[in-house]
Image (cartoon, helix red, strand yellow):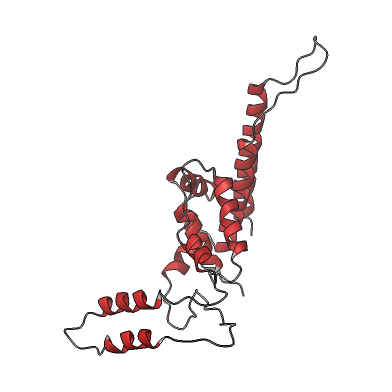
């Protein structure tokens, strides 16, 4: 039976007994060398769990050391771009979604679950586009199941793409017959976009 939990429930679910969302890829290199200096640094700053020890400071120090290690065939730069993804100031919703998907395709071993991907993209959007997703969801976007969230994003992206395209009025070669005015064409696109959004909401409500 498919998981019926919403995005919000999954994001708040306890992690005990579940695998980490980030999958560490296997090291393909035949020979891998750990530098003696790094081992010494780790050994000199071991954590023993004493009352006066700060576990958070130890983790920060350990991460600082391990961040200097570069593993073969692991595109850290692309993974960081996915993790730190943000919608650009001059970027439309559909452009942001396409760019996010391009980053995921460029880094096939990123290891992020679908839940993590959707959450990252939603939180990277500006407030207007987040409101648009909430409106299309008929409430809080995160109160929908992941598969429904993906459908809403895809549908919203298609609607926004059709609205973002420049409207070119058709002009007849016959001087006595003019083409459709830009205002009429724009109104037609708005009605079409409204209809598509309503259709998405109805499909989500159907069993």
Name, please, the residue furthest toward the right. 174
x and y percentages locating residue 24 in the rendered image: 52, 78
x and y percentages locating residue 22 in the rendered image: 50, 74
Quadrant assignment for the C terminus? bottom right
x and y percentages locating residue 123 in the rendered image: 45, 55
x and y percentages locating residue 114 in the rendered image: 56, 66
Is residue 81 at all visible to an observer of this figure?
yes
Tell me if 15 is positioned left or right of 42 in this view.
Answer: right
Nearest to the observer: residue 57 or residue 20: 57
Nearest to the observer: residue 151 or residue 43: 43
Nearest to the observer: residue 50 or residue 198: 50
Picture quadrant of residue 59: bottom left
Residue drawn at (53%, 69%) of the image: 112
Is 54 situated above or below 185?
Answer: below
Nearest to the observer: residue 147 or residue 49: 49
Residue drawn at (46%, 45%) of the image: 131
Is 43 situated above or below 171?
Answer: below
Quadrant assignment for the N terminus? bottom right
Tell me if 69 is positioned left or right of 179 in this view.
Answer: left
Is 113 situated above or below 207?
Answer: below
Residue drawn at (54%, 47%) of the image: 136
Residue drawn at (54%, 73%) of the image: 74
> How many circles with numbers are drawn on the protein?
0
Is residue 6 at all visible to an observer of this figure?
no
Name, please, the residue furthest toward the top. 176
Picture quadrant of residue 34: bottom left
């Amino acid at each position: 039976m498919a998981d019926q939990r919403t995005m919000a429930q999954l994001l708040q679910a306890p992690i005990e007994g579940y695998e980490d969302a980030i999958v560490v890829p296997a090291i393909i290199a035949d020979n891998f060398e750990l530098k003696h200096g790094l081992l010494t640094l780790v050994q000199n700053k071991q954590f023993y769990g004493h009352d006066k020890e700060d576990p958070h400071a130890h983790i920060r120090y350990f991460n600082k050391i391990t961040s200097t290690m570069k593993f073969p065939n692991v595109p850290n730069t692309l993974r960081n771009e996915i993790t730190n993804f943000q919608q650009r100031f001059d970027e439309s919703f559909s452009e942001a979604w396409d760019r996010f998907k391009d980053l995921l395709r460029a880094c096939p071993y990123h290891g992020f679950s679908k839940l993590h991907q959707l959450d990252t993209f939603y939180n990277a959007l500006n407030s207007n586009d987040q409101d648009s997703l909430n409106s299309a969801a008929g409430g809080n976007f995160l109160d929908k199941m992941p598969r429904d969230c993906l459908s809403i994003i895809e549908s919203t992206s298609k609607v926004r793409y059709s609205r973002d395209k420049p409207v070119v009025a058709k002009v007849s070669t016959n001087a006595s017959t003019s083409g459709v005015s830009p205002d009429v064409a724009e109104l037609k696109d708005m009605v079409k976009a409204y209809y598509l959004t309503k259709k998405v909401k109805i499909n989500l409500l159907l069993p």
